[in-house]
Amino acid sequence: MKTSKIALNLTEGKPIKLILRFAIPVFLGNLFQICYSLVDTKIVGSILGEDALAAVGSVSILYTLLTGFFNGLSLGFSVITARFYGSGEERKLKENVAGAILLGYLTATVLITTVAIFIRPILTLLNVPPQQMDMALSYITLLVWGMFVTLAYNLCANTLRAIGDSITPLIFLVIAALTNVAMDYLFILVFHMGVRGAAVATMLSQLLSVALCLNRIRQGFPILHLSREHFALSKKQAILLYESGLSMGLMSSLVNFGSLVLQSGINQLGTNIIVAHTAARKMFEIWGLPVSVLGSSMATYCGQNYGAGRYDRIRQGMKSVLILGAVWDGIVFVLAHTISPYLIRFLTSSDNEEIIYWGTTYLKVDMSFLLVCLFIVILRNCMQGFGDPKTPILSSFIELVGKLVFTFVFVRLFGYWGIIWTEPVIWFFMVIPLIVMTLRNPVILEAKKTDHLV
């Protein structure tokens, strides 16, 4: 099959080296994405004040919910693409990419329109403080409609990663991130657009990254060039795509919907708690980034090797990544217990002791249990790659139920302490079905029989 020289075949070579070569560009891309999100937070907090930062923070989980769903949907589609790439079936690969575009935008049209129509009632259910409602509404409304652009980038990026190219999405994401920073200052400082300026900057920078990706695909990736005949979506193909795409989309959505419900509890605890939690979650995203990147990389790695029938390589890759992730978790534990107060103070641009205390406490507690989260992220992404979409959804459903219980029971009893302990407790319940079903999976059982060093 014709691919760019920078695309990786993950079915040949030493697993851990290939996984790292693939994962590092993904990590850098996501790091830049988080960094310009931090810049948004820093600019909004330092220029527009704590009320504006609280307004953005109070609805950020809704934005995360939608972006997580569309990234999961496109990642699920790309897992099937990776299987066809691994098996060498070029025509099916192209039909899969075309089907992903059709189903992705059909789903987006229904979901985005529904959310946009009911956006104000949704913010009311989130308990957004009345004094911040107008700012929050203007900010999130723009981002919701911008989801069409977000989906386009995710489809491009995850399709390229499915055929082993994690470098192209990185390059254009970096360009978009730098553009976003410049536009933040332009729209907020020069044009005085307030929080709407941050939303507009995000949308335009994402649009730039989509244009760059499409142009690169046209010039350098013949395997992804589609014609009208590839868009003749069959019922069988649609079921296959939706089984994988909706599984990963729902997996992400259940997690983020639980966080959205949790945010409704946080929004009742006052501006200081909202600001502290917003900053702490930003640091959680950064420190947890290597774990999430290894997880998404393993979905592609397992997909390619599953398509090629290399089950032994799947098992080897899983073992190596779990060890690597455990080392990172040890580093994060030390960081969380030493420099957290300085990071919270920097992100919030505040010397408010209550904000710094609660943000620091959240990081110390939750980062102490990141190893459990590592097993959850790696195992459920691997299971998607080798054809088990049901167990990851079960695990995510456990998280949703747990967050509902904590929000409506423990947060009311213990305040922000109930928020702090929500995820560590739930993680232990989530990981059990993943471990049990991984050990019972036919792919892993077969790999034990044929496991050998590559």
Image: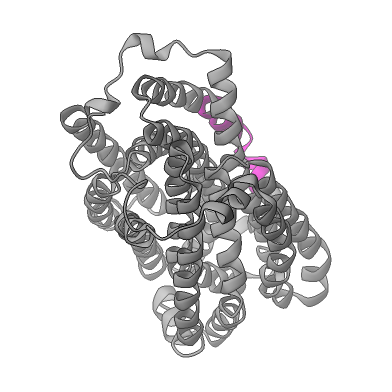
Query: Can residue 342 be seen here?
Result: yes
Q: Is residue 424 above or below residue 379?
A: below
- Find residue 427 and report its image quarter: bottom right
Task: Determine the residue positioned at 63% across, 48% down.
Answer: 123
Q: Quadrant of residue 346?
A: bottom left
Q: Tell me residue 116's x, y (percent).
A: 56, 34
Find residue 266 and report its image quarter. bottom right
Query: Residue placed farthest to the bottom in the image?
Result: 338
Which residue occupies 58% across, 28% down? 242
* Frontmost residue, 279 versus 150: 150
Tell me the quadrant of the picture where the N terminus can be found: top left
Residue 430 is left or right of residue 447, and the answer is right
> Which residue is painted at 53% across and 20% down in the image?
237
The picture places residue 304, in percent across and down from the top left corner, at 42, 41
- Is residue 344 part of the magenta span, yes or no? no
State whether residue 58 appears in this view: no
- Left or right of 236, for residue 86: left
Q: Magenta-highlighted stretch: main secondary structure?
A: helix
Q: How many marks?
A: 0
Figure quadrant of the C terminus: bottom left
Residue 435 percent location from the top left of the image: 67, 60
Residue 394 lies left or right of residue 3; in this view the side is right
State the colouring used for the structure image: one colour
From this viewpoint, which residue is outermost toward the left? 219
Question: Residue 263: x and y, percent?
Answer: 65, 59
As displayed, is residue 80 above or below residue 29?
Answer: above
Residue drawn where x is 58% and y is 39% of the image:
387
Residue numbers of the magenta segment: 108-123
Examine the rendered structure and indicate whether residue 12 appears above or below residue 324: above
Above or below, 211 relative to 69: above
